[in-house]
Image (tube, rainbow, N blue to C red):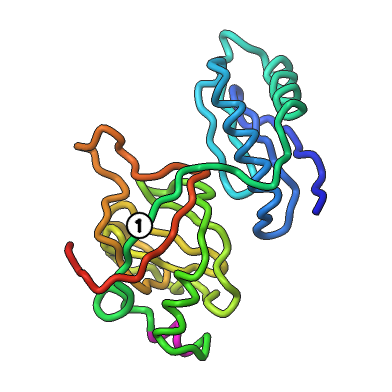
Amino acid sequence: MLIKPPRILPYGDSALLVDYEVEGYSEVANTQLHHAAKALRSDSVWQEIVPSYKSILCVFDLAKMTMDSATTKIKKTLSQTPKTPQFSGKIIEIPVVYGGKYGPDMAAIKKSSGLTQSQIIDTHSGQDYRVCMMGFIPGFCFLSEIPLALQHPRHPSPRANVPAGSVGIAGWQTGIYGLDSPGGWQIIGRTPLKLFDKTREDLFLMEAGDTLRFIPSSKAIF
């Protein structure tokens, strides 16, 4: 599948947005994007490189580089970035206790999908997912597209508190809460792993570009 070269757009006074023009989630665009983000990160001129589903935010020091020179540098990096069909991030296994008190929205997913709980678990854990972006709270990971049968809209009104480690569904997305937080995603399980830990040398368990593999578990150690 061929995609158009990304647009490079000003994003405030000292940042540029590399935007891939695709509809919905594109595995091809996201792979190219992470290759580009890795190449950009290797150049110390950038203050911050933040990849997402279909764009990369490139932040620079306006005292050291103009908008035009930053644009030229991005174009050069993109032209030299390989367009291989795979991206090699870490593979991280995520144990998940599905359903019950750890998955309060499992019933809603059962109703909309027509699947049993076992089938939902098998479907959700039956493929690997790319970490496409990190946000909106520390450690929250937005993952690649879930199977169509499990896609389900988020709650009209968010819960006041969703426990850290909760695995949720929102539309075509799935993700994991890094901290206790308000949230409107449909929660189907929880992992005991800490995605964010301020006492750990590596604060974050994962980063954009890594691959997650959900492992169904019956051990609820929280």
Task: Indicate left or right for 93 with 19 as reference.
Answer: left
Query: Which residue is farthest left?
Result: 221
Viewer-proximal residue, 90 or 156? Answer: 90
Amino acid type at circle 1 is Tyr
Q: Is residue 9 above or below residue 127?
A: above
- In the rendered image, residue 88, in percent from the top left (x then y), is placed at 55, 42
Q: Is residue 156 magenta?
A: no
Extreme residue toward the top, this view: 64
Q: Which residue is drawn at 65% across and 41% down?
A: 33
Query: Main structural element of the magenta stretch: helix, strand or loop?
Result: helix
Q: Give the range drawn in magenta.
A: 107-111
Kindly indicate the quadrant of the structure image that contains residue 52.
top right
Q: In which quarter of the image is the C terminus?
A: bottom left
Element carrying mark 1: loop
Q: In this view, does 88 lie to the left or right of 161?
A: right
Residue 170 at x, y percent in the picture: 49, 68
Q: Where is residue 74 in the image (x, y as percent from the top left)?
A: 70, 24
Residue marked by disc 1? 177
Residue 29 in the figure: left or right of residue 180: right
Write the residue at 73% across / 17% down.
68
Crowding at label 1, few (<14), some or many (≥20) Cα neighbours within 10 Å?
many
Looking at the rendering, which quadrant does residue 220 occupy? bottom left
Image point (48%, 64%), residue name: 174
Position of 27 compared to 133: left or right?
Answer: right
